[in-house]
């Protein structure tokens, strides 16, 4: 087989703090690979994101948990490059790198609807929309009506949905539950629950 024939053609990018990665992240990755017919989904734990006020857990922990969480998702690899960058990490920089590495591929940026609502505020959002198709999954929020997604917020208006059963789980809730010594087994993959426990993450005492 020639190198060109082996090169991936549809590459998804899925970024997140993954602090920790949870079952909705895994379900979204699976749904994206299947519904978008991806040849490859690259998962990018972010560096210290400019739009999150809270300091994130150590890069090494988020990377290790991401590798555990996404290990069984077909055609999915965890990519550490955003963690290795100094300074702020911008999605547009990663998309540009993917474009250089795979000039022929279609790039798809996979995000939840909460992120899509603020996509127009991301660094160089117009360039993001030029480089990638935006693939958006509905996101249910605990104790809140789902916010209807406004497609006009996507720069260029070019997007497609990823169908995902509503999963009202967030990393924020998981950290809070651990801090209160409550169980999280129903919210994260087993290996991630073990990692959190063994490494004493998110505890206050
Ligand atoms: P936090 O609560 O710390 O803000 P989070 O649960 O939102 O974290 P992130 O790592 O910020 O997790 O999310 C990564 C990506 O996964 C984002 O695009 C986000 O929209 C999406 N996502 C996270 N949780 C869900 C969910 N329950 N349903 C659909 N998409 C989700």
Image (cartoon, grey):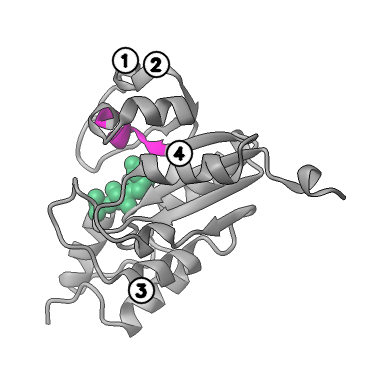
Q: Position of residue 129 (x, y in %)?
A: 41, 26
56 vs 122, nearest the viewer: 122
Q: Please report contact status of discs 3 and 1: CB closer than 8 Å, yes or no.
A: no
Is ligand 1 less than 8 Å from the beta carbon at label 3?
A: no
Per the image, the residue denoted by label 3 is 60
Q: Look at the image and give the residue range highlighted in magenta.
A: 111-118
Q: Residue at x 38, y 28 (%)?
A: 127
Crowding near the residue tagged with mark 4, few <14, some 14–19, many ≥20 C-alpha atoms within 10 Å:
many
Q: Please report contact status of discs 1 and 2: CB closer than 8 Å, yes or no.
A: yes
Per the image, the residue denoted by label 2 is 157
Which quadrant is home to the C terminus? bottom left
Is ligand 1 less than 8 Å from the beta carbon at label 1?
A: no
Q: Quadrant of residue 9?
A: top right
Sequence-wise first label, 1 or 4: 4
Real-space Cα separation, disc 2 to disc 4, in angstroms: 15 Å
Real-space Cα separation, disc 1 to disc 4, in angstroms: 17 Å
């Amino acid at each position: 087989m020639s190198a060109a024939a082996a090169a991936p053609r549809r590459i998804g990018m899925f970024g997140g703090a993954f602090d920790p990665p949870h079952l909705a992240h895994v379900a979204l990755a699976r749904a994206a690979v299947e519904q978008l017919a991806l040849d490859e989904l690259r998962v990018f734990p972010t560096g210290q994101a400019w739009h999150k006020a809270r300091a994130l857990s150590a890069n090494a922990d988020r990377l290790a948990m991401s590798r555990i969480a996404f290990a069984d998702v077909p055609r999915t690899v965890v990519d550490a490059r955003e963690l290795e960058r100094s300074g702020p990490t911008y999605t547009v920089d990663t998309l540009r790198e993917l474009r250089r590495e795979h000039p022929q591929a279609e790039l798809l940026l996979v995000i939840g609807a909460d992120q899509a609502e603020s996509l127009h505020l991301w660094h160089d959002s117009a360039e993001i929309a030029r480089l990638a198709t935006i693939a958006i999954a509905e996101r249910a929020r605990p104790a809140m009506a789902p916010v209807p997604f406004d497609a006009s917020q996507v720069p260029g208006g070019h997007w497609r949905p990823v169908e995902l059963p509503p999963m009202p789980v967030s990393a924020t809730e998981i950290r809070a539950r651990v801090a209160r010594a409550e169980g999280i087994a129903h919210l994260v993959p087993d290996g991630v629950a073990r990692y959190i426990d063994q490494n004493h993450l998110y505890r206050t005492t």
